[in-house]
Image (tube, rainbow, N blue to C red):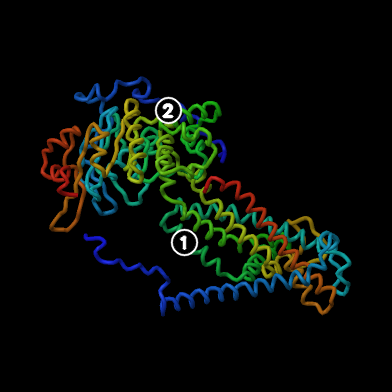
Amino acid sequence: MEQPEQKIATQTELPKPAALQEPRPSAAAVSDTPGATVFDSKNVSIYYSSFRAVTDVSLSIYENEITAFIGPSGCGKTTVLRTLNRMNDLIPGARVEGDVHYRGESLYATGVSPISVRRRIGMVFQKPNPFPKSIYDNVAYGPRINGIRNKGKLDEIVEKSLRGAALWDEVKNRLNKSGLGLSGGQAQRLCIARTLAVEPDVVLMDEPCSALDPIATGAIEDLMHEIKSRYTIVIVTHNMQQATRVSDRTAFYSVLRDEKSDTRTGVLVEYGRTEQIFNDPQDERTKAYVTGRMG
Amino acid sequence: MAAGTVPQQAPNLREPKGWRRTKNRIATALMVLAFILVIIPLGFVLYTVVARGASIISWQFLTGSPIPPNTLPASIGGMWPAVLGTLTITGLATLMAVPLGILGAVYLNEYGGKNWLATLIGFMSDVMTGVPSIVMGLFIFSIWVLHFGYSGLAGAFALGCLMLPIVIRSTYEMLRLVPNSLREGSYALGATKARVTVTVVLPAAIGGIVSGALLAVARAAGETAPLLFTILTVTAANPNVFSGANTSLPSQIFSNASQPYVGAQDRGWGAALTLIAICFILMIAARVVTARFTRYSR
């Protein structure tokens, strides 16, 4: 459905972060010396009303890498992920202590608009959530928000994004059909295409394959490898094999239970290169988890 | 496992006998009975109105004016003043109540959340649903008609007051059904709240919103009580909905059907059938329009 024109022309000229302008060397080439720091979380605690869901998380996420968050259910990995583009703002009662820096700027400073943050830092959700619109309109949604109205330009972006999400060949003949008619794997790739269409700097993925079969999962993982030279990716996953297959770095979270008050909170146990986390974990809890003795 | 050594008994896949089956049949029978009981009055109303009214309806009846005195037969004059009044007054009430009601529901569900203002508005709107329609008429009579006189506009105010809570409640329920994942998907692309509401939430709920609005329109189009004190009941066509006494189909049904004259009673039946037909056509038209908006929803 066509929407009335909105006056947001000023936002079409968003200065792109340097990372988007020049192709970067692949992450493999910089594997031992990490690229620029994209996120720098310092002592982040996250509360849902009075419940402290996550305590004291500090970690840095680097450019053009895939960073995986793993851990048992309820350890706060999704919650931490959602602090990176201020999606937690949408949950009533959610509150963040500590600070998250994105390319040197504090995300939680006064005057920072979550809208501007999310235009740079996109998100793909656990359950594919295509809009009840045509495939074309799904992908063109973000660019239209940014004020792009030119049909030719939109066509170009839609094709490029769908190709980028490895979906173009499957849907090019039915772009005006509903996005809800796609299979689970296709719908998730449509959501990735929708995210890529706004040319974000970072793509956050919250268990993007948990609702998909192994073939669709493989397609999404291949896709992540293909696009990581242009984007920084953070993925939450329940699947440890997936973390070893796709990620450069892994953060292991766990649940800390306070015996006295019988409260639980998520903590970051160990963070390092993926090979190290899986082959040579330094913490007993990590070791127990990655060897399958727990969680 | 030593398969084959013990002879396998054929599994019994037939419907179990006894009390369980009896219960199932009783429940099915009760449901069919309930359906028939519901259908009887509905079918009977429709049958009676069509049987009594169909012979009265003619082009002359629909477009003729003015409405003749009660003693004259239905072949003279026509219902045009009432048809015109119903269309203009209900139309004006719809223009007032539907946009306001949808915006109110958007506030309640998308913006207000659980704050005191939203809670208060939601509560008041529910209370308003229970206000008898004649009280709405009296209310408009005392604050509007006493100062500015009878008019279609006053009738539209009364009908609008009646429609507003229905539109708010039905739209609110539809907005609540829109999954949060759609809102999040839109927010994650950097959409503002207004954007999310206009481009994702409302389109996703449009089918139900239109249904609710139609229900309110049909309810208002059939109301007599709120119009008694606000438009009066005249027999001449009044194309100016903003000033002067007016009339409507329900008002004419009321005033004609309570007469001892055959002509007047015939006119009442004709007006009743006309009213049903107008609502029916409206429903179909709205369905066709909504189908266009919801073609991507399945």
Q: Disc 2 on helix, strand or loop?
A: loop
The answer to whether any part of residue B148 appears in the image is yes
Residue B111 in percent (x, y) is at: 45, 51
Q: Nearer the viewer, residue A4 or B6?
A: B6
Residue B187 lies in what quarter of the image?
A: top left
B112 on left or right of B264: left
| Residue depicted at x 23% and y 51% | A52
Residue B208 in percent (x, y) is at: 55, 55
Q: Callout 2, which amino acid?
A: Leu
Q: Which image quarter is the N terminus of chain B in?
A: bottom left
Q: Residue under circle 2?
A: A14
Alpha carbons under labels 1 and 2: distance apart: 41 Å
Q: Disc 1 on helix, strand or loop?
A: helix
Residues tagged 1 and 2 counted as in contact (Cβ below 8 A): no
| Residue depicted at x 45% and y 41% | B192
Mark in front: 1 vs 2: 2
Tell me, for residue B120, which label it has, or none.
1
Residue A11 in percent (x, y) is at: 46, 30
Q: Nearer the viewer, residue A217 or B110?
A: A217
The answer to whether any part of residue B158 appears in the image is no
